[in-house]
Image (cartoon, rainbow, N blue to C red):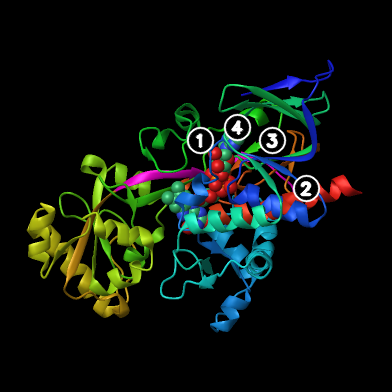
Amino acid sequence: MSVADATKGEAFDADVPLLIIGAGAAGLCAALAAKEEGVTPVVIERDAVPAGSTALSAGLIPAAGTRFQREKGIDDTPELFAADIQRKAHNEADPVEVETVAKGSGPLVEWLADRYGLPFDVVDNFNYPGHSALRMHGLPSRTGQELIDRLRSAAEASDIVILTGRVVERLAAAPDGRILGVEILCGDGARERIGCDAVILACNGYGGNPELVRRFIPEMADALYFGHPGNRGDAVKWGEALGAQLAHLGGYQGHGSVATPHNILISWAVIMQGGIQVNGEGRRFCDESRGYSEQAAEMLHQPGGIAWDVFDGRIADVARQFEDFRAAERAGAILSAESIAGLAAAMHVPAENFQAEWSEAETLKANGGTDRFGRKFSPAQRCAPPFHAVKVTGALFHTQGGLAIDASARVKRKDGTLFPNLFAAGGAAAGVSGESASGYLSGNGLLTATVLGRLAGRAAAKQLTV
Ligand SMILES: Cc1cc2nc3c(=O)[nH]c(=O)nc-3n(C[C@H](O)[C@H](O)[C@H](O)COP(=O)(O)OP(=O)(O)OC[C@H]3O[C@@H](n4cnc5c(N)ncnc54)[C@H](O)[C@@H]3O)c2cc1C
């Protein structure tokens, strides 16, 4: 990946007004928004069919103040949402970006629903850590595959061209940082040069680049990467070469509940509803309710880098709304037993330790007590047979650091001034999670992909049509 000085009169094979690099949620939301403003973009995508990390996700977008929430009597505001984001991010997130995404989230979900027919509803049978209102909006299957398929269909119906099987390898930039075009490597080895008036980077972060992960997030250097392998940090590398401001490169979304060896995401609902995690010695090791993101590194410190999610039949019913959980059941990842002793035998963990931890947690639940790690339990979380367990490990889902942007998703230079025609959204842009995994509030990934994608598309198109 490189940036070339294009003042020497580089010739392009074709010219388009707006180029969008990456056809995940960010790129496709940007494309739809630009098209509505009268600019037909061209989207370049590495894969044969757009998928990205978006397809791997649960497809849940947090949004505040939507009609879907009002229909269910849920009170929520962008201000409350912004406060939740900053609390989880230890107040390290850019306040302008936080306000921008919190305010834009409700309109974003309603826009996708009303204009493009995405049938969202609010997940109302469990809440994710750190959200003070039920605000996760999902599609019927609760999969990111459905989200990306529906976005791609909307783009196709809007006559947006997505050039697939092509990797953007180089940006051609003028000395003032204006992007003049890109060089593309096609699947057949041919090269294309396309000139443009503006570029939106929607090519996510660097989770698929082991060298950059080791450089910026050493604690996850040896962890399973569970995101899209094509996200190789091109935006960060181009940004470095162009002199862009990069922010929060240590921030990331981890997850402490990936079924192993099956590699299937087990929803954190199993914990929030009252499940616990024990390690291979049958012992609990932290307050699981802080969040799944920080739990990834925590788990890698346990013997063998694994732990067990333990829950009951009521909780399994809640988790079954996720296709991933159903797939885990089909794959035989979920162990079941009528007693804790029976489950301990199936898990091959010391029954005495496990029984003691389980009994303590159940007593705390009955009394609404707080455990030695600071986790608060409630009577509604009590469990009853049948009991279930699934062996899980910690994984890196996606990186949250990237290019610093303004409220219109324009990329900033190191000195804070703006590049003339460069925008970034989703994982390519710096997120709102601060410097560490513990700053990631559930949904921050698709929040910044969709809301910033829409803003970038709209702002780029407006700039081109004045
Ligand atoms: C298992 C899992 C579950 C998750 N669940 C959730 C969730 O429920 N809610 C949530 O908010 N977030 C979730 N996330 C995070 C979320 O998926 C991402 O934050 C979000 O999808 C990022 O969208 P994006 O458009 O920026 O990137 P992507 O969807 O990854 O799209 C980027 C695209 O750019 C393409 N690309 C990269 N480089 C180039 C190049 N040089 N040239 C051409 N194309 C290129 C890639 O092929 C890719 O298709 C989850 C992530 C994972 C891995």
Mark closest to the chain's N terminus, 3 or 4 = 4
The residue labelled by disc 4 is: 166
Alpha carbon separation for disc pair 1 and 2: 25 Å
| Badge 3 element | loop
Q: Is residue 389 left or right of residue 8?
A: left
Q: Secondary structure at mark 2?
A: loop
Disc 4 to disc 2, how far (Cα)? 19 Å
CA gap between label 3 and label 1 equals 23 Å
- Residue at 52% across, 46% down: 51
Kindly state the secondary structure of the residue where label 1 is placed. Answer: loop
The numbered mark, 4 or 2, whose residue comes first in the sequence reads 2
Describe residue 173's horizontal placement relative to residue 45 as left or right. right
Q: Earlier in the sequence, mark 3 or mark 1?
A: 1
Q: Please state the extent of the stretch shown in magenta in the rendering.
A: 393-407
User: Residue 245 has which mark?
Assistant: 3
Q: Are marks 3 and 4 in contact (CB under 8 Å)?
A: no
Spatial distance from mark 3 to mark 2, Cα to Cα?
Answer: 29 Å
Crowd around label 1: few <14 · some 14–19 · many ≥20 (10 Å): many
Q: Viewer-proximal residue, 276 or 411? A: 411
Q: Nearer the viewer, mark 3 or mark 2?
A: 2
Is disc 1 in contact with disc 4, using a CB cutoff of under 8 Å? no
Q: Residue beneath label 1, please? A: 230
Q: Confirm or reject: label 1 Cβ below 8 Å from ligand 1.
A: yes
Whichever of labels 1 and 4 marks the residue nearer the N terminus, that label is 4
The residue beneath circle 2 is 40
Q: Is residue 252 magenta?
A: no
